[in-house]
Image: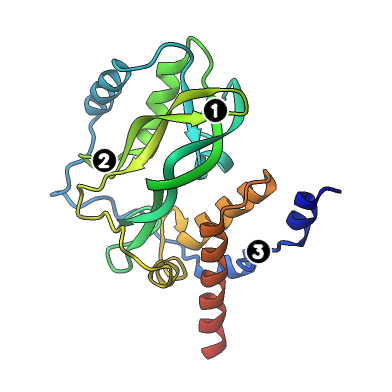
């Protein structure tokens, strides 16, 4: 066994499924407040068409760095490991829906500026790109303007590089929270839950999928340790 294989075998997530279950609550979708502008079907189509007007030549690729790894949005033709330079995973978007509520806001992970991010490049099947991206657009964006905005990023592969669609944090919106400490993030993820599940569940699923693929993200690994400690401490004080 290689040193890398030994390290992976030794690493055990502190944020277990049992701890994640303690955070879960069955909640109904409250929807958005009527004052919140959201995408209509026409908005989605217009946005996608405008985005694809700047498509680089060649096949269409999507950079998967979070839930797209463990819950793909489409049947990809291929998936290759790659690194996006100048981008990093960050729980930097406050949310009051999906994995949080207005009473207990959660945090959504996105790509934010700085560092590097190792993930996977998923290639779409030729001929069906538009239909598959329609699904992806509706999954990743709801509010206008989107907090999780798509852009073309260059992803380095083992041999060469490709431009890929990546969903990145929009720093111009009020729910962008880039200055949170690890303690503040873990406090939120250890409590917040919405109709899609908890922030702890999202973190657990993402770290688990990355580790299984041989990708170790120190930022997420430290977060899962902190979140596990907080969930455990709350249980012990009851």
Who's the residue at 42% across and 19% down the image? 131
Q: Which mark is residue 13?
A: 3
Disc 2, SS: loop
Kindly tell me whether residue 188 is visible in this rendering.
Answer: yes
Q: Is residue 216 left or right of residue 189?
A: right
x and y, in percent, of residue 18 in the image: 63, 68
Marks 2 and 3 sit apart, C-alpha to C-alpha, by 32 Å
What's the CA distance linking mark 1 and mark 3? 26 Å
The mark found on residue 230 in the picture is none
User: Which of 133 and 207 lies nearest the eye of the viewer?
Assistant: 207
Tell me the SS state at disc 1.
strand
Residue found 47% across the figure and 29% down from its top? 62
> Which of the two discs, 1 and 3, labels the residue nearer the N terminus?
3
Tell me the number on the disc at residue 122: 1
Residue 102, image x, y percentages: 27, 63
Circle 3 — which element?
A: loop
Is residue 111 visible to the viewer in this orientation of the structure? no
- The residue carrying pointer 2 sits among few (fewer than 14), some (14 to 19) or many (20 or more) residues within 10 Å by Cα, namely some
- Specify the farthest residue to the right: 1
- Residue annotated with mark 2: 146
**Residue shown at 57% from the left, 69% from the top:** 225
Q: Position of residue 175 (x, y in %)?
A: 25, 55
């Amino acid at each position: 066994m290689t040193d890398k294989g030994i390290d992976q075998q030794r690493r055990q997530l502190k944020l277990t499924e049992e701890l994640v279950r303690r955070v879960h609550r069955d909640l109904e979708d409250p929807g958005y407040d009527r004052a919140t502008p959201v995408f209509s079907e026409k908005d989605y189509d217009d946005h996608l068409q405008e985005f694809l007007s700047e498509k680089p030549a060649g096949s269409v690729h999507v950079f998967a760095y979070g839930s797209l790894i463990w819950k793909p949005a489409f049947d990809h033709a291929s998936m290759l490991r790659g690194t996006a330079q100048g981008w990093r995973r960050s729980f930097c978007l406050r949310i009051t829906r999906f994995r949080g509520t207005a009473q207990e806001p959660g945090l959504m992970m996105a790509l934010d500026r700085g560092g590097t991010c190792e993930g996977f490049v998923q290639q779409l099947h030729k001929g069906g790109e538009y239909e598959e991206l329609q699904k992806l657009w509706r999954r990743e964006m709801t509010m206008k303007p989107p907090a999780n905005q798509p852009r073309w990023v260059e992803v380095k592969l083992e041999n060469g590089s490709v431009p890929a669609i990546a969903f990145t944090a929009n720093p111009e919106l009020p729910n962008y929270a880039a200055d949170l400490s690890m303690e503040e993030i873990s406090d939120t993820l250890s409590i917040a839950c919405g109709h899609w599940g908890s922030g702890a569940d999202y973190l657990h699923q993402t770290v688990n999928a990355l580790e299984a693929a041989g990708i170790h993200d120190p930022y997420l690994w430290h977060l899962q340790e902190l979140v596990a400690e907080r969930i455990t401490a709350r249980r012990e004080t009851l």
